[in-house]
Amino acid sequence: MIELIDIHKSFKKNKVLNGLNLKIDSGLITVIIGRSGGGKSVLLKHIIGLLKPDRGRVLIDDTDITRLNDRDLNTIRKKFGMLFQEAALFDSMTVKENVAFPLREHAKMSEVEISRVVAEKLKSVGLTGIEDKMPSELSGGMRKRVGLARAIALQPEIVLFDEPTTGLDPVMTEAINQLIVDTQKNLNATCVVISHDLESIFKISHKIAMLYDGDIIEYGTPDEIRASKNPVIEQFLSGSIEGPIKII
Amino acid sequence: MNRAAVAIDQLGRTVLEYVEEMGKIALLFLSVLRWMFQPPLKSHLIFKQMEFVGNKSIFVVVLTGAFTGMVMALQGYYGFKMFSAESMVGSVVALGMTRELGPVLTSLMVTARAGSAMAAELGTMRVTEQIDALSVMAANPVKHLIVPRVIAGVLMLPLLTVVSDFMGILGGYFVGVHLLHINSGIFVKNITTIVDLDDLYNGLVKAAVFGLILSLIGCYKGFNTRGGAEGVGKATTEAVVLSSITILISDYFLTAIMF
């Protein structure tokens, strides 16, 4: 269970999160929607302890990770996998070394076992025979899939996706959506996805949370969000330039 | 009056920023020390950085050392000739190289080559979220990225300095003996009489300190990069400038303490 309680976060004078509260249900895909630059990535980074809130608590299975030391935080982080926006593959390593990285760090496996798991994880994201390629040789979609293979290498309980389909063509977008759904099913994981892509959001999500003005203003099933009478959500879903969301 | 106050204010700010930066670098150094002694050692990462800092800098160090020794011999010759003491050229070249120019010039060249690359590489890793990816995978970025670079800097700079010292003396010998016709026996004898092993050792201690400075500052600047390609460029420039200044300032104090 992931729970964010009264989270405040500012960068210099820019208040990004303003008393945010959110309880993310386990074993579901929760998509966080909101404006570009509205603090969605900041929210995600709080969940995994990359950022510490100015005030408030982040509970992962009832442990407040904002108060943990490095070692204890790392123990909690082993429950996580994260797919970054641009995949964040280590560009000095091959695809195999990238996917093997968490295994070498945390699993006591022989090289033979590591090779087997890497091949298996790459196959699960639809890639084979690219183990020796460098990340710079891959297309955007391939990089994201390798990033996902790396994120799920240690069978995490929670997988975070930072704009997984941004910049991809419709076919690859659909492929990534399917992978998110499959990942959740296969690992029975809690998935938290940040996205603007409305079509994808309604296709994959069990729950949707709308972030606006530094707080979650609505949290519910896709049907509940669609039926919402909140003018901010209505404007966001319709893509209208008229409404409470101001274009800056 | 007002303008003077603004100038003093600006100077104060700059000094405060420099001191604050040094404080942060010192804290990073403590973190490096802490992670350095936590197993596992990650020796493959250390050797990779040693090769990058050491082996790949040899050519530039050989060239710099040789020409520095050659020009010192040339300049020294014209000075000493006024007192008919041309035979002292060898010892001046050797003393200058081992005590001062070997470690300082080597460190400045390695700063330009490897210190800048450390800042650029870590800076790019920061802006492309690769450092965050390390943290997310419960792998400490200081241990994986900074410790190997600092160890490589501290170990390789003295070795490169030995190469630089040797090439400098060789260059000086070539110019002094072959071009300026100083007797080779006297040239070498003066070196062995006047230059002490302590001169060499102290120069190597300096080099190790400079290696620490350039790797720590390069890593610090890269690690704290903000804001895309422009940020990486800025971090790289700042790393080279700050390292060079700090090397030259600390050189004075190290010399005052050791010699």
Image (tube, coloured by chain):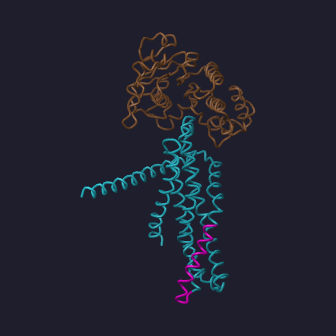
Chain colours: A brown, B cyan
Question: On screen, B213 above or below B144?
Answer: below
Instruction: Name above or below for residue B245 compared with residue A212.
Output: below
Residue closest to the eye, B36 or B22: B22
Does residue A95 appear to the left or right of B93 in the view shown? right
The answer to whether B246 appears left or right of A87 in the picture is: left
Q: Nearer the viewer, residue B179 or A73?
A: B179
Q: Seen from this angle, which residue lies furthest bottom?
A: B84
Residue at 59 percent of width and 66 percent of height: B161
Corner quadrant of residue B107: bottom right
Q: Say whether residue B76 is magenta.
A: yes
Residue A49, horizontal then vertical, whole percent: 48, 33
Say left or right for B60 vs A206. right
**Closest to the observer: A242 or B73?**
A242
Q: Residue at x 43, y 49 (%)?
A: B24
Magenta-drawn stretch, dominant element (helix, strand or loop): helix
Q: Residue furthest toward the left?
A: B1
Q: Residue at x 30, y 54 (%)?
A: B9
Against A105, residue B5 (above or below) is: below
Residue B198 coordinates in the image, percent (x, y): 55, 73
Report how many numbered discs are placed on residues in the image. 0
Please state, as top left, top right, bottom left or bottom right, where the N terminus of chain B lies in the image: bottom left
Residue B190 screen position, x and y as percent: 59, 83
Residue A209, placed above or below residue B111: above
- Indicate the position of residue B113 as horizontal and vertical percent values: 59, 57
The segment highlighted magenta reads B63-85
